Image (cartoon, helix red, strand yellow):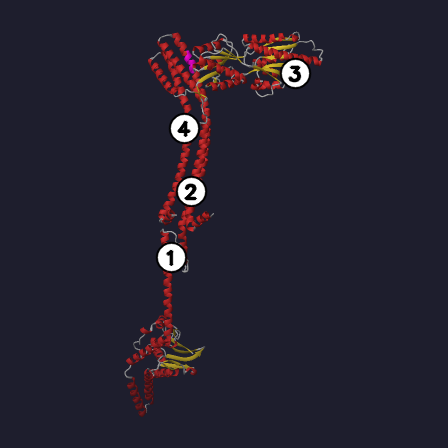
Amino acid sequence: METIKRIWKSINRKNIFAVTTFSLILLMILITLGGMVIFKAQFDESVSIENQEEYTEYNRYYALITSDDREDFWQAVYNGAREEGINENAYVEFFAGDLGTRYSMEERMEIAIAADVDGIIVEGEDNDSLRNEIIKAGENGIPVVVINQDVPESNRISFVGIGRYDLGQTYGRQTCELAEKMLRERDEENDDESRGEKLQIRVLISQEADSNGQNLLMSGIREEIAANTALEDKIELDTYTIDDSGAFTAEESIRDIFMGQDEVPDILVCLTEIYTTCAYQAVIDYNRVGITNIIGYYDSETIRAGVDKEVIYCTISMDTEQMGRYCVYALSEFLDVEHVSEYFTVDTYVVNKENVDRQGRVRSYEE
Amino acid sequence: MKSENKLVNLPLQNKLIAVYCLTALLILIVNLFMYSNINSVLHRLDRIYVSNINLNELWGSLDSVQNDMTNYLNTKTTDAMDSYYKSCQDYTAQMERLSDGITSDESQRMERNIKAMSVRYLELTDLAIEAKRGRNVEKYRTYSEEATTVYNYISTYINSLNNEQFKSNSANYNMLSVSMRYVEVVNTVVFLAVIFGNVLLVILVIRNITKPLKSLSSVANQIAGGNLEVTLLEVNSRDEVGVVSKAFNHMIISIRNYIEQLKASMENERVLKENEGILKENELKMENHLKDAQLKYLQAQINPHFLFNTLNAGAQLAMMEGADRTYEYVQNVADFFRYNIKKDHDSVTLKEELELVDNYVYILNVRFSGEIHYEKDIDSSLENLEVPSMILQPIVENSVNYGIRGISWKGRIWLSVYREGDCAYITIRDNGIGIDKEKIDKIMQVNLKESDISSGSNGIGLYNVISRLKLFYDRDDVFEISSQGKNGGTLVMIRIPL
């Protein structure tokens, strides 16, 4: 206080002018500097946003090529692959999937070969053009891992997927379980009319998919059902071929089941994510909830919702992220030591009403 | 504080220059600030679309390579070949600038892919050209087809990358336009603030400069209005205004001192005058005039005693011879002269003065055969009034000499003495030729010193009479002449306070 008083005293009348002038100039300079600082802060911020991204460098570059990059299934595979890639110092991307032009898988293979990537992960299809591309890649020194479905007689280094026979057995077990449950319910209802009638079980198979894989799967289902002698004369198993040659045709084919002259089956066994989703919607649309049950494939959001609402009895899924991880592991292993196991089997698990509300696929799998 | 004192002591001119320079400097700083802000934004803006431009150039070069290859395959000319190699060189040079790292950044990976594909593409085009030169038709077709496929892939990649970069560049551009608007606002605010501050500063400084001038002018006005009791100016600065103010203060003090001195000396003078008295002065003057009159008179006459004795002898002789009229005449002349000899006092009674006039008129009437008709009307109670001597006779003489002498009608002179209010009046009127206004003014204003005995006059001049009357009664309105104009006669009136 004393100092302030002293200062105030020293600012007598004569000095007021000088002090005012000086502070006015100081104020103006401060305003200018303040403006400069504010602007610089804003500008630096915008520049820093602009250059914000810090890039990580990778040693290897793997191309992931699938028929539909946006599908949940492939997104999950991609996530697993990305994760493993970071561990292996390799960058995985959906290769040439987001360009101005939409390319076929074969063309994308071509581009990947021309771009000289370090490895290719490709969704398997049993056709010659893809087989040729895989062979071509091999000729150019690029290892190829085939995923989900094997491409025989190509020089792919590994196949990562589910054992079709095992998968068939799982389907068979779930089918038996469901059939037993439905028969039990029917007995309880004492429905005389329907008593004695056989349960109709229909497996939806693809027209396009390789016959080998489907055959294996079907034999797995059949064997499992056959093993269950109690059901032997109470169920009737048949297959229904879905026309998925063109875009959107699968959905039409599935609706035909409900609209057709034939009796609508009691159990629909779906072998792909698309079939499961379409069947789920059709059951609701045609008011067959509780009458027609679905055993599905994969556990996308929609499918899990279906399971939760008991429209889908259960769905058989696999650890897709594990799938992705195996792919990257296989490629890196091959590049490092030039040798790797030819088959990687991915774990499968069943999602039903009991475990569906638990979050996430991985946890279900862990259980 | 030192520097501020310096500022205060600066000459006016330098002060004003300093204010101007200071404000200009501030504006300059703000301008520099704005310029640097805008410049940094513009600089960034310039670089924003560089990547797009580069990609377009790259695509152009790629296109040239493809065209030149096709051209050579079509025509196989040396020109096409040269052009192809040149394009290849261009393209390689541009391609080399692309990033070839595998990173998490999509653009960089795309660049890497473009680069890798370009290497493959150039290999293929080279092979196609080689095959064409070697006339291997099948091979060059295969290679060129493969090259074209790869060319298409690269084009797609470049276009996609271009698109991607355009998107991100546009985002950056938007960010910079935000900055630009920001700059606008900040600049405007700062500029306005500084302009405002400058105006305040100028007002402050100019007021500081003009304040002493204003107080100086107000004080000057007060002094011009006659008020010397103003408070002195306060002088803070040593500039021109300070100097003038100081000088002004000195001036005020000097004027005050001078006026004090002047007042004192005037006071002294007044006291002196009072002591000596105006009366004494008048007495002296009176004496002087009388002496002067007598001297003049004596100079004008031969020894009056001799003349008087001579005339007395003549009167006795006339009586002895029984010539009564002669006796009376000579007796009157002798009386007339005796009055002059006898009267050496300055005041006489009115009666004595009147007798002298009677003598004079008698003598004149004898001389001029009764031409002058003299009438008098006297308030006898005033006959003992004391008046200066030798007053009436000169007036009558004047009336005779300048009034009625030479007129064609009968000359008359009226003399009356009467009382009115607290004054006694003596009037002498004639019916002569009169006197004009100018002459009257001249007579009334003429100084005693200039007065003289007029030529042709028998005695004392009119001026002498007027002066003495004024001195005797100490007032100016004692004597008055009036006339009706030409041939209107003249009236002389003497007002004597009782």
Looking at the rendered structure, whether the residues under marks 3 and 2 are on a common chain is answered as yes
Q: CA distance from mark 2 to mark 4?
A: 36 Å
Q: Are marks 1 and 4 on the same chain?
A: yes
Pointer 1 and pointer 4: residues touching (CB < 8 Å)? Answer: no
**Residue carrying label 3:** A290
Q: Determine which of the numbered discs, if any, sits on residue B249 in the image.
A: 1
Mark 1 crowd level (few <14, some 14–19, many ≥20, 10 Å Cα): some
Q: Is residue B219 magenta?
A: no
Type of amino acid under label 3: Gly
Residue stretch in magenta:
B145-151
Give the secondary structure at mark 3: loop
Q: Position of residue A240 (x, y in %)?
A: 60, 9
Q: Secondary structure at mark 1?
A: helix
The tag earlier along the polypeptide, 1 or 4, is: 4
B390 vs A59, left or right, is left
Q: Provide the residue designation for mark 4.
A: B46
Viewer-side label of 2, 4: 2
The residue where tag 2 is placed is A26
Q: Amino acid at mark 2?
A: Leu
